[in-house]
Structures are given as structure tokens and as C-alpha cells.
Amino acid sequence: MKRLLPVIMFAAACGVLVWVTAKFTSWINGLPFVTYPADAQTEAAMNNAYAAYASVNQLLTGLATGLLAALGLFLTNGPKPSSRGRTLWLAAASALCVCVSIYWGYISSQNLEWAIEASIPTLDLPKLQWPRIVQFYAILSGVFFFAIFLMLDLTREDSTNASNT
Amino acid sequence: MLPTRKIAACCLLLWPASLPSQRPPQPSKLTVTSTPAAADIGIDGKQMKQTPFTFYVSAGNHSVSVTSPGLKKCPARQLLVPAGSAVTVNCTEQGWDANPNWRS
């Protein structure tokens, strides 16, 4: 039971996160807006703006996927997770933040598709800006947790090596 | 891993599928006209363009007003715009024309 408790707590945290994220998504998509069709000049500028938005989205999603891969590689190649003790929660938090970032990247691209389909002539809508903000800060938090995890884990290995020699 | 735990993990992964769609609802079109034309349009308290003009708006209630020196009887009024629909409202010197989508 003592070993199961962290797993249950992690699963519960994931469940709460999924619920909060779903509610937040529907709140963002339900926010009111008023805008008007683009003229010929604005349309050309908007196409460039859509492309720039999409490429930043791709960059952030690529970085998040890379970070998740690095985390997996580090965890599977290093010492056993049980010997990592208290630093493992930092890796779990980092993985969660990265997954949240990937999810918001998906929502962001979906909302961009919606804007292009509906010929929305501006990116300055809450449903386009919020997902990107959350995507960015989620990956930033993921990098932060990963960096602390690495720092603590490498320091711990060094001290173990030092005591062995 | 025990089968019950595997089943619980699968249920947790499939849970988001039962949640409502994450795609935003289709925007609606709101056309504001007036007689005479070239009056200032206000939507949700913000001054927008001049009549006649078509806006993209989110589904739901919006406050619409039309003002010009010759049009004094079209103050802000709540309008219900259904998702993906096209709604037209017209302002004359006598006031707003009848429309089933007016809420107040």
C-alpha cells in the first residue's frame, strides 16, 4: 500500500489536470468576440501572420517532444528510478508540463485552422492567444523542472561516486 | 501489472474522449444596416465601423447600437446570434426593425 500511494496520487493529479484542462479549453473556446472581414491588403498580411503563428507552434511542439524524449532517455539510461528517491517527482512534473504543452499546441493549431476556415482576419482573439500562452509557459515549466531534476540527480551521483572512491 | 490496474489505466486514457469537443463553434455573421446609411455601429460597447457592415461574431448575446445625427432611436439592444447563422438588423428613424432575435 505504501508503494501504491504515490502511483494513486499521480493518477489522481493526472485526472484533475485533464478535468481542469478540458474546462479551461471550453471556457476559452466560448469567449465572445467581434471582428470583421479582411480587405485585400490585410488578407496578404494575414496569410503571413498565420504562417508565422503556425511555425512558432511547430517549434514549441518540437521542443516539447524533444524534451520528453530526453527525459525518457535520461530516466531509462541512468540509475534505477527507485534509487532516485525524492528527485523523481521533478521528472514527473516536467513530463506532465511537457504533455500539457503538447496538448495546448494541438488546441492552438486546431483554433488556427478554425480561424483560417472562417476567414477570421485577426490573431488577436482570446481563443488564439490563450492556447499559445499556456503552451509556452507549460514548456517553460517543463524545462525548469527538468533542469532542477538534472541538477539534483547529477549532484547526487557525484556525491555517490565521491563516497565510493 | 494486475489486470484491474491495466483496465483502470486504459479507462483513464480514454476518459478525454467522453469530454465535449474542443473545436470552437462556427462564427456567425451579423449585418447591421441603417436608413440613412453611414451611421456609427457599436457592438458590445465598442465603436466599430459604419453602416452597412457585416461582422463576424461569436454565438450568443451581443449588444448592438447605431448612432448618427439623424438616427436617435436605435440605442444599445441585446441580440441573440445563433452559432453559424447570419443575422441582419436594420435601424431606421423610427427605431430598430422587428427581428425575432432581439432579446430586450
Image: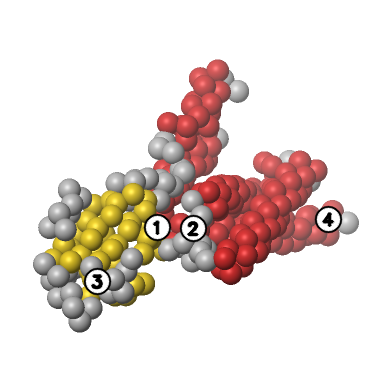
Report the front residue among A136 and A127.
Answer: A127
Callout 1: chain? B
At mark 3, the secondary structure is loop
Earlier residue among tags 1 and 3 = 3
Residue named by callout 3: B36
- Above or below, B58 against B37 in this view is above
Residue named by callout 2: A120
Q: Which percent across, then down, holds residue A151?
A: 72, 62
Residue named by callout 4: A161
**For the residues marked 2 and 3, what is the alpha-carbon distance in whole angstroms?**
29 Å
State the image quarter where residue A80 is shown: top right
Residue drawn where x is 47% and y is 32% of the image: B17
At mark 1, the secondary structure is strand
Residue drawn where x is 24% and y is 58% of the image: B89
Residue named by callout 1: B56
Amino acid type of the residue that numbered disc 1 sits on in the rendered structure: Tyr
Report the front residue among A84 and A101.
Answer: A101
Residue drawn where x is 23% and y is 78% of the image: B68
**For the residues marked 1 and 3, what is the alpha-carbon distance in whole angstroms?**
23 Å
Q: Are marks 4 and 2 in contact (CB under 8 Å)?
A: no
Callout 2: chain? A
Please check whether the numbered discs 3 and 4 fall on a single chain. no
Q: Which percent across, then down, holds residue A38?
A: 51, 64
Give left or right: position of A41 versus A26: right
